[in-house]
Amino acid sequence: MSIAVLAWPTKTSEVRLFELDNGTMSQARLAKEVWDYECYAGHRVWEGARGTIGTTYPFRQRHRHTRSQTFPRLHVVLAGKEEPLLDNRLKALADDVEGIAVAVWVDTLPRLQRGEPWDEIGVDDPDRRRRRYAEPVSR
């Protein structure tokens, strides 16, 4: 799978994330790659001197996508196989990432070339991510 980060400023995000799957990895590995984005989005770091109250903040907001108010949308493009197989892969990926707490849009390359719309299989939910990923322990 290849990744691309596209600078595409909007009101809520400064970038969009794109993953291109050429059909060379297993379905389980593809789903894990998508779930890794949720883990990255939920990663928080501790800031504060030892012995002080301090605070936590989203790692990506401070160090990667500084203007983004929300986690950037992930676009997954499926390619490298015949269209019926890609459609099956799309449906399987949607089932495998059900309940993910980041915005994930997926489509096949042939459908994109025909101008068909993306399928939304994940919705950004920062509150659910905070419940899933524990706060870092203070020093």
Image (cartoon, rainbow, N blue to C red):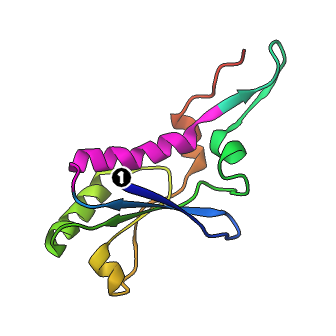
Q: Quadrant of the N terminus?
A: bottom left
Instruction: Residue 57: give x, y in percent of width and height.
Output: 71, 37
Task: Verify whether residue 14 appears in magenta.
Answer: no
- Please give the name of the residue rendered at 65% of the width and 39% of the height, measured from the top-left corner: 59
In the foreground, 91 or 66:
66
Give neighbour class at mark 1: few <14, some 14-19, many 20+ (Cα, 10 Å): few
- Please give the name of the residue rendered at 18% of the width and 65% of the height, measured from the top-left corner: 88
30 shown above or below 50: below
Instruction: Residue 29: name its quadrant.
Output: top left
How many numbered discs?
1
Instruction: Residue 5: give x, y in percent of width and height.
Output: 53, 60
- Main structural element of the magenta stretch: helix, strand or loop? helix
Instruction: Residue 129: name its quadrant.
Output: top right
Task: Verify whether residue 26 appears in magenta.
Answer: yes
In the foreground, 1 or 61:
1
Left or right? Give the position of 23 relative to 135.
left
15 shown above or below 53: below
Q: Amino acid at mark 1?
A: Glu
- Please give the name of the residue rendered at 65% of the width and 48% of the height, measured from the top-left corner: 64
Left or right? Give the position of 31 relative to 25.
right
Left or right? Give the position of 62 relative to 107.
right
Q: Quadrant of the C terminus?
A: top right
Residue bounds of the magenta highlight? 24-44
1 shown above or below 8: above
Instruction: Residue 48: give x, y in percent of width and height.
Output: 80, 24
SS for dot 1: loop
Instruction: Residue 17: give x, y in percent of width and height.
Output: 51, 60
Q: Which residue is mark 1?
A: 98
